Image (tube, helix red, strand yellow):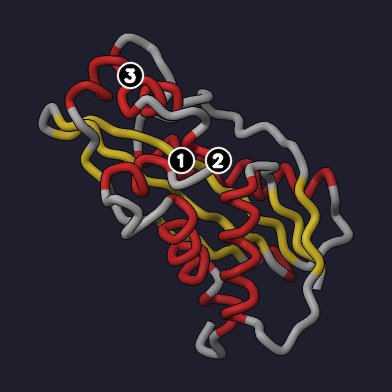
Amino acid sequence: MKVVIASHNPVKIRAVKTAFSLQFPENNRKFFPVQVKSGVRDQPLSDRETRQGACNRAENARSQQPDADFWVGLEGGIETLDDQLIAFAWMSVLGPGGNRGDARTTSLQLPPAVKVLVDQGMELGDANDKVFSTINSKHRGGAFGLLTNGLYTRESVYTEAMVMALIPFANKLY
């Protein structure tokens, strides 16, 4: 099974690998990270834009490497709801015959200090690093890890959503 992942972020790659091994334990899997465009802003600012970015990444990965079995797009995003900044991500998986599975992570309310920086135009990962005095947190536990003291991490939340995105390929009802 050849899986193309539209990311070089180690957190995203590990989440995809874990989810595929959970959903398809009997298959041999090979993973190939690629760099592709999302077709949306670097920091998606809505649920719809974030989902579109994940779908675009999966499609662009398929265009770049059409000889795979699966193509995976992951996109983190934010949205302001009732003056609260919320973080989440979308997973999109393209499979054989053009079938697609999508899933969204759980949401996380971000601290006001992060919202101020994001409202000033800073990307979420950079804002988190500044507020939490960390470096490159989006390649580690992310805001999820920082705010839950490691109970949940960006990787664990992405893995859970990726397992859900794979349901249409792993369950006979689809």
78 horizontally vs 101: left or right? left
- Amino acid carrying label 3: it is Val
- Amino acid carrying label 2: it is His
Q: Quadrant of residue 67?
A: bottom right
Rendered position, 72 above or below 125: below
- Amino acid carrying label 1: it is Gly
Residue bearing mark 2 = 139
**Looking at the picture, how far across and down is residue 8, in whole percent?**
70, 42
28 horizontally vs 55: left or right? right
Identity of the residue furthest to the left in this view:
82
Lower sequence index among marks 2 and 3: 3
Give the residue at x 50% y 71%. Answer: 163
Q: Quick one: SS at disc 1? A: strand
Rendered position, 92 above or below 163: above
Rendered position, 99 above or below 104: below
Rendered position, 98 above or below 55: below
Q: Quick one: SS at disc 2? A: helix
Identity of the residue furthest to the top in this view:
120
Between 133 and 72, the residue placed more toward the observer is 133
Q: Quadrant of the N terminus?
A: bottom right
Between 72 and 16, the residue placed more toward the observer is 16
Other residues around mark 1 within 10 Å, as few (<14) / some (14–19) / many (≥20): many
Give the residue at x 60% y 30%. Answer: 39
Other residues around mark 3 within 10 Å, as few (<14) / some (14–19) / many (≥20): some
For residue 94, which numbered disc appears in the image? none
For residue 118, which numbered disc appears in the image? 3
Give the residue at x 80% y 54%. Answer: 32
Residue bearing mark 1 = 76
Lower sequence index among marks 3 and 1: 1
